Image (cartoon, rainbow, N blue to C red):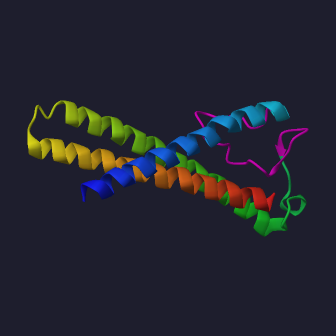
């Protein structure tokens, strides 16, 4: 059981690190493209990403988006899903910090230490799932553009 937990933790750390590299490189690509229409808060994309005219920064009509009205709706829905998944990622990171705090204040109590470790492990699993989900959503959204 201990070996399985160690393997899962190592895999989660590897996936999290690789996902972080992908997220960290995204703003540089955006900055290189020169679009000021997609200003981000933290890493959250704008809800209208992919459905605006880059020259005027105005939302275009659905018939000018690839796929027409269904493509327009899917693009906005995927943007909102990505925002929600990134919020889950931030929440998971907060739970990792909370689990670390609980571990520190457990003062050697085995039950409290076990609960803190479980909190940290579950938060890491949630963070890995969130990062993977954001990648999948971005892959689908890129295919729609």
Q: Residue at x 58, y 48 (%)?
A: 83
Q: Name, please, the residue furthest toward the front.
A: 3
Residue segment shown in magenta: 36-58
Q: In this view, does 97 lie to the left or right of 138?
A: left
Q: Which residue is drawn at 42% across and 43% down?
A: 91
Question: Percent x, y for residue 45?
Answer: 66, 43
Residue 116 falls in which quadrant of the image? top left
Question: Percent x, y for residue 23?
Answer: 62, 40
Inspect this view and state whether residue 84 appears. no
Q: Which residue is drawn at 70% across and 57% down?
A: 139
Q: Give the main secondary structure of the magenta stretch.
A: loop
Q: Which residue is drawn at 76% across and 36% down?
A: 30
- Any magenta on residue 85? no
Above or below 28: residue 142: below
Question: Percent x, y for residue 68?
Answer: 84, 66
Which of the pair 15/28 is nearer the observer? 15
């Amino acid at each position: 059981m201990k070996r399985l937990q160690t393997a899962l933790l190592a895999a989660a750390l590897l996936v999290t690190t690789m996902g972080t590299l992908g997220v960290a490189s995204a703003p540089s690509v955006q900055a290189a493209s020169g679009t000021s229409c997609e200003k981000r808060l933290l890493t959250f994309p704008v809800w209208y990403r992919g459905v605006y005219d880059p020259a005027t920064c105005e939302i275009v009509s659905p018939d000018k988006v690839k796929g027409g009205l269904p493509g327009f709706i899917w693009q906005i829905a995927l943007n909102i899903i990505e925002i929600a998944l990134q919020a889950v990622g931030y929440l998971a990171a907060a739970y990792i910090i909370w689990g670390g705090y609980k571990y520190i204040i457990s003062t050697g109590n085995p039950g409290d230490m076990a609960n803190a470790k479980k909190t940290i492990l579950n938060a890491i699993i949630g963070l890995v799932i969130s990062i993977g989900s954001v990648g999948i959503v971005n892959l689908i959204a890129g295919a729609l553009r």
